[in-house]
Image (tube, rainbow, N blue to C red):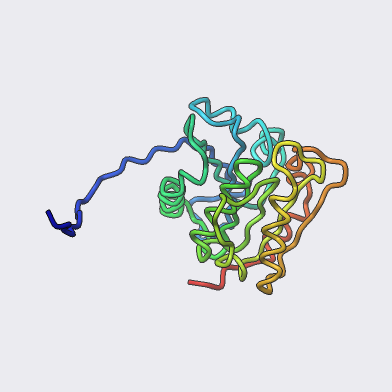
Amino acid sequence: MKQTVAALHKEIVKTLELQYVVYLPTDFNPNAEKKWPMIYFLHGINQRGSDIELVKKYGIPNNLEAGEELPFIVVCPQCPAGSFWPLENDALMALLAEIVEQYPVDQDRIYLTGYSMGGYGSWDLALNYPDTFAAVAPVCGGLVPGRNPESLKSLPIWTFHGDQDSVVPIQESKMIVHALESMGSSVKFTIYPGVDHDSWTETYRNPELYAWFLQHVRTSQ
């Protein structure tokens, strides 16, 4: 028999589910016309599952739980058990669209960050949707193997990594930074000397990060 060529054309309905935590600034007024900048925060691998309180264990939501105040709407989704943030891009973008619909988010000032697995998620989500975010700050993460960071070259990026990281080697960040620099990107790279995997504590307690976010407004539409 000769080989024949055919094509499948079928619509599939996909159900997306993500739990999440939302922080609203102290002076937030839902009835005001003010639009707020937003931070989209992606946690690490050990906070996956169905216990939403795990999301508050480290990073920005942990700081907020301890009483820190930020001039941002902060949205912290939880990755389902057994999954990986780069596999949840559809759900993350669907949640972002819902948040923008429900809250007065300034869509030109949406900032993306995450640590460890969330660092991988930040790189990957920004790579796939570079026109969505005003700036990105991945912490001790890397790119999914085989991905080209070219779409990130014009996006403001500040990445962080400990030079003694035994979980995600610093080379993961160095490879991306060097690739972006070769494309003319002005990516910022902070290396913590003597620090193992926990780059997030110092990063998210640094007020300079939040000031840096607010310096950037999305230019691509």
- Residue drawn where x is 63% and y is 47% of the image: 119
Find the residue positioned furthest to the left: 1
State whether residue 3 is above or below residue 163. Answer: below
| Residue sitting farthest toward the right | 194
- Left or right: residue 14 versus residue 91 is left
Q: Residue at x 64, y 38 (%)?
A: 61
User: Which percent across, then down, holds residue 26?
Assistant: 63, 45
Where on the picture, by quarter, is residue 187?
bottom right
Q: In the shown orientation, is residue 142 left or right of residue 83?
A: right
The residue closer to the viewer here, 69 or 184, is 184
Quadrant housing residue 156: bottom right
Of residue 68 and residue 58, the one placed in the foreground of this image is 58
The answer to whether residue 84 is above or below residue 181 is above
Q: Which is more toward the observer, 69 or 13?
A: 13
Q: Residue 70: x, y in percent?
A: 68, 48
Give above or below for 167 relative to 73.
above
Along the line of sight, the residue nearer the viewer: 175 or 138: 175
Please tell me which residue is depicted at 53% across the width and 63% down the height of the picture. Answer: 130
Residue at the top extreme? Answer: 51
Return the x and y of residue 105 as percentages of the image width and height.
51, 57
Q: Is residue 210 left or right of residue 45?
A: right
Q: How many marks?
A: 0
Q: Position of residue 220 (x, y in %)?
A: 52, 72
Q: Residue at x 66, y 51 (%)?
A: 138
